[in-house]
Image (tube, coloured by chain):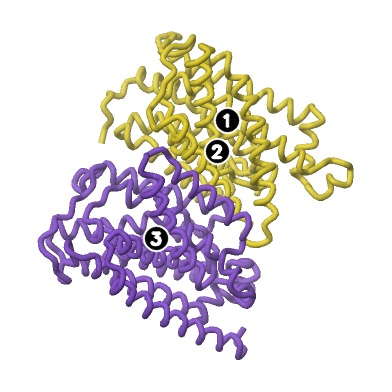
């Protein structure tokens, strides 16, 4: 894996990513439509979230269907600190990330002993407990949630009413950071450990990989980045409630781009988000407006077809070498 | 924090009794899931939607043909049997063949199916809440030694017990049941003795769906019916199966009873909106101590 081809591929990935980022940054200069810009923001946000999810679930193989917990904690930390104490969202973002990372490690301590479906269900019920507690937590707005008062457009309070562009560029940076962290980790000691843990934890342990610690590391990084995404979302929509930021559906939606794009791959989450999110939004607004569920039918059919036809993810369509790299 | 009801011996016995009845129904919902998992290691993420369409089927038989849910239950179970077998043949059969990421493919192909089913329900039935307004069972209670038991839940519990007894004999005493067990032990080897693996799996899916169909027919008498109704019960069903231990059909039955009792107890102590917290906490407690669930083999 350390051969020249691998090093070459990594450099090429970096160049492609840089080119993508530059092109993406230029798009809003030509596309002024607010609706389209909104979709682009969401696409970048989901790319970042799915990339973060992919670190724990894809690379390290610990399938979490409870990541909405970290997203929600990020969103709530920012919103509560801002509305109750006037703390700027930037500190909330950092705080939410750190709290989430700490919670992920505290939960990882008992949960990482579990395997397979027992682990997956544990992640679901923990997020669900948090959801129920937030729905009953009056100080935090209970089920009604929090309306973040919009004062004036400013980078200081990270609020913009007149233009989506600042959100767009922040989401782009977020997606780029998540991608870069993954890119860097892929070739680090951690990256190798995670793949060993995913393939065969017992063998990894016997070869001296500290299985437990490497799972904890993956959980902390993954939770931190997910929470930052949650903080961003709270600022972007300026209204949050438990169901919309901590619901089980959201955990699945976060995982979906990585799964369809290619789980445990560098480009999977990006590719999945770029295809899936615009499609979701377009079906929702063009055929979902009737409220009769046609968008769900289209969307669900697509998920079934892609997961059956491309179990290794859509990245498999682009390069054969990519598949080797996964192994 | 105390619940709204004051804790007397009577209220405690009363809620444990209704918790037990509900728990048997949870067991019935979960046992289909456990059967399918035990057979082929697949978790059906559309299980809640199976329940949802069973409830709708019961509702429409009632609304258009005035068939009482108690009579339509076998019909609904039979219809769900066919549906479950078709889902296996059209989707799951291909999902289990996936060479990469088998686990994720199973989760997301059945999750996609769940979304499609919810969309179809919205499209054809609208998001309106429906209910079976009057039935032989609905709205009645009987009193046993001073404890009031709602008749629909009581009937559900009896149907659940009957279904478990039936399932036990079916698995242990019939050829198909033995083929089911054999396929579950070693799907490769059964082909050598002339058992068609796909047929057994399809019948297993049919049987699992029929069991949840039975539960849906009973539940239609005391729950509102709407396109998303399956979601909350599905999560409880997963927890029930995992609590009992994956691979154990008996575990799902026991898990259901525990879940029902824990839910009722939690509702006594915490506000009703937090009653599921008790179920989830007990699940975590159990698997932290026994990572394979109570009766699990894997």
Dots 2 and 1: beta carbons under 8 Å?
yes
Chain letter of the purple region: A
What chain is tagged by disc 3? Answer: A
Answer above or below: position of B49 versus A174.
Answer: above
Element under label 3?
helix
**Front tag of 3 and 2:** 2
Label count reads 3
Residue A56 position within the rendered picture, expressed as x and y whole percent measured from the top left? 48, 65
Query: Mark 2: few, some, or many residues within 10 Å (few <14, many ≥20)?
Result: many
Residue that appears at 53% across and 41% down: B238
Dots 3 and 1: beta carbons under 8 Å?
no
Residue A106's disc number: 3
What chain is tagged by disc 1? Answer: B
**Front tag of 3 and 1:** 1
Answer above or below: position of A137 versus B135.
Answer: below
Tell which of B111 and B215 is nearer to you: B111
Q: Is residue A27 left or right of residue A91?
A: right
Element under label 1?
helix
Query: Mark 1: few, some, or many residues within 10 Å (few <14, many ≥20)?
Result: many
Chain letter of the yellow region: B
Residue B47's disc number: 2
Residue extending farthest to the left is A151
Residue A308 position within the rendered picture, expressed as x and y whole percent measured from the top left? 62, 54
Spatial distance from mark 3 to mark 2, Cα to Cα? 32 Å
Q: Is residue A98 left or right of residue A314?
A: left
């Amino acid at each position: 894996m350390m051969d020249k081809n691998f090093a070459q591929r990594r450099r090429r990935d970096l160049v492609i990513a840089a080119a993508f980022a530059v092109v993406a940054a230029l798009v809003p200069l030509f596309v002024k439509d607010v609706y389209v810009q909104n979709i682009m923001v969401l696409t970048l946000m989901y790319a970042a979230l799915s990339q973060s999810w992919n670190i724990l679930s894809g690379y390290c193989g610990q399938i979490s269907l409870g990541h909405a917990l970290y997203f929600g904690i990020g969103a709530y930390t920012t919103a509560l600190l801002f509305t109750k104490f006037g703390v700027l969202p930037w500190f909330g973002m950092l705080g939410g990330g750190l709290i989430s990372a700490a919670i992920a490690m505290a939960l990882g301590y008992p949960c990482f002993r579990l395997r397979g479906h027992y682990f997956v269900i544990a992640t679901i019920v923990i997020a669900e407990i948090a959801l129920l507690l937030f729905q009953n937590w009056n100080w935090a707005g209970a089920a009604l949630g929090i309306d973040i008062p919009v004062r004036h457009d400013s980078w200081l309070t990270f609020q913009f009413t007149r233009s989506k562009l600042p959100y767009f560029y922040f989401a782009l940076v977020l997606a780029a950071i998540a991608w870069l962290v993954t890119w860097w980790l892929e070739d680090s000691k951690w990256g190798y450990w995670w793949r060993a843990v995913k393939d065969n934890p017992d063998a990894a342990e016997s070869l001296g990989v500290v299985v437990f610690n490497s799972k904890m590391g993956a959980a902390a990084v993954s939770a931190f980045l997910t929470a930052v995404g949650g903080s961003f979302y709270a600022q972007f929509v300026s209204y949050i409630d438990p169901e919309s930021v901590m619901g089980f559906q959201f955990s699945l939606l976060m995982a979906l781009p990585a799964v369809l794009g290619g789980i445990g791959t560098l480009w999977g989450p990006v590719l999945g988000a770029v295809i899936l999110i615009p499609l979701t939004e377009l079906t929702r607004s063009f055929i979902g407006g009737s409220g009769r569920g046609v968008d769900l039918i289209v969307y669900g059919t697509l998920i079934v077809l892609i997961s059956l036809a491309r179990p290794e993810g859509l990245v498999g369509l682009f390069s054969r070498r990519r598949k080797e790299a996964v192994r | 924090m105390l619940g709204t009801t004051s804790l007397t011996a009577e209220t405690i016995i009363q809620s444990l009794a209704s918790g037990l009845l509900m728990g048997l129904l949870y067991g019935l919902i979960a046992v289909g899931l456990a059967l399918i998992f035990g057979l082929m290691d697949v978790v059906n993420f559309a299980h809640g939607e199976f329940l949802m369409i069973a409830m709708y089927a019961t509702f429409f038989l009632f609304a258009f043909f005035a068939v009482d849910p108690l009579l339509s239950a076998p019909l609904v179970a039979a219809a769900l049997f066919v549906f479950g077998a078709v889902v296996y043949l059209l989707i799951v059969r291909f999902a289990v063949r996936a060479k990469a990421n088998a686990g994720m493919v199973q989760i997301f192909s059945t999750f996609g199916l769940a979304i499609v089913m919810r969309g179809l329900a919205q499209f054809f039935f609208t998001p309106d809440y429906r209910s079976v307004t009057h039935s032989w069972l609905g709205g009645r209670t009987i009193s046993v030694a001073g404890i009031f038991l709602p008749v629909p839940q009581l009937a559900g519990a009896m149907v659940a017990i009957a279904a478990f007894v039936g399932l036990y004999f079916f698995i242990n005493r019939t050829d198909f049941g033995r083929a089911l067990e054999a396929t579950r032990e070693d799907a490769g080897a059964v082909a050598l003795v002339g058992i068609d693996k796909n047929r057994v799996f399809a019948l297993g899916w049919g049987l699992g769906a029929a069991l949840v169909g039975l539960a849906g027919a009973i539940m239609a008498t005391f729950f509102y019916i709407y396109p998303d109704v399956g979601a909350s019960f599905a999560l409880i069903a997963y927890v029930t199966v995992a609590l009992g231990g994956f691979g154990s059909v008996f575990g799902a039955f026991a898990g259901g009873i525990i879940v029902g009792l824990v839910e009722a107890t939690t509702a006594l102590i915490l506000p009703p909106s937090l009653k599921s917290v008790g179920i989830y906490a007990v699940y975590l407690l159990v698997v932290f101590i026994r990572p394979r669930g109570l009766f699990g083999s894997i």
